[in-house]
Image (tube, grey):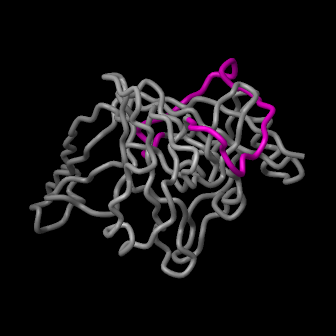
Amino acid sequence: MEKLISFIIKAEKGFFKKPDINEGIYLTFNMIHKPALLGILGAIIGLEGYKENEKFPKYYVELKSIPIGIKPMGDENGNFQKIVISYNNTTGMASEEAGGNLIVTEQTLIKPAYKIYLLIDLTHTNQKKLYEYIKSQKAEFLPYMGKNDYSLWWDRNEVEEYEFESIVENKENFIISTIFIKKNTTVKEAKEDKQDFDLFDFSGLNDNQFVSFERLPISLNEKLFQYDYADFAYTNFRLKAEAQINNLYKLDTGELVQLN
C-alpha cells in the first residue's frame, strides 16, 4: 500500500556543499537534493550514517527507492537569500601551512524551507516507520539542513496526505508545483541542447512569472562513490502539453508534482 504525503522542513540557515571549491569559498546548492534529503529522513527514523569508506550508509541503502518531490517555500522566484560566513579555527589543529590558524569561508542559505513530497510504501518496514514519525513530528536523531549547526524542524499540523494518480500524458498545457528534471542528458548532450525554453508556454507573459535552473545530485554512483546529476527547473510558467516530463503525479488538490 502506498501513501503520498508532504511536510515542510525549515531552518534558520542551511548549507548543501557543492563538491567543487571556488577561490577558497565553499559553495552551496540552492535547492536541497535527494541524497541530502535521504540523510534527513534517515536521521528521523534513526538509521546509521557513513561508517566505512566506499560503503553506502544504511539510510541511503534503505531509503533510496522512495520517490521524492521538492518544492521551495518562502523563496524568491526559486532562489533563497545567501550570505558568506567565515569561521576562524584557532584550536591549533589547523594545517602548518596555515600557521595553525585556518579560515573557512562558506556560502550559506538564509531561512531555507522546502515542502517535501514522499511516495511511501507501507509494506516496507523503514518507510512505514518514516510515515509514522513524520506524522507525529518525531525524530530519533536531530535532523539538520546540510550541516549539524543548522538543525531543522517541521510542524505536524502542516503534514498533508493526498489521493493521487500517475500521469502518463498531458492533453493540455500544465504547471508543475515542484522542481522537475527537464530531461535525462549526458554532459555532452546538455552542452549541445539549445531547446531548454521550448518546454514553456510564453503566451500571456507577465512580470510575476519566472524560471530558474540548477544542476543537482539525484543519487550516489555505485561505482565511483560520487554524485550523479540531473538538470532541474523550477517555474510558474505553464509547460506545453507535448513536453516530455517523466514521473508526474496529479494530487487531489489539483497540483502536479514530479517524484524521483
255 versus 127 height, above or below: above
Residue drawn at x 46%, y 64% is 229
**Residue found at x 78% / y 48%:** 127
Residue 235 placement: quadrant: top left
Magenta stretch?
Answer: 145-174
In-front residue for pair 254/37: 254
Spot occupied by residue 130 in the image (x, y as percentages of width and height)? 75, 42
Which x, y percent locates residue 110? 34, 30
Residue 220 percent coordinates (x, y): 53, 67
Q: Looking at the magenta stretch, what is its main secondary structure?
A: loop
Taking the spot 65% from the left edge, 39% from the top edge, the residue there is 117
Decide whether residue 30 is among the magenta residues: no
Say which quadrant the C terminus sits in: bottom right
Task: Compare residues 66 and 106 and report the one nearer the observer.
Answer: 66
Question: In front: 42, or 113?
Answer: 113
* Residue at left offset 26%, top offset 53%: 26
Q: In this view, does 101 lie to the left or right of 70?
A: left
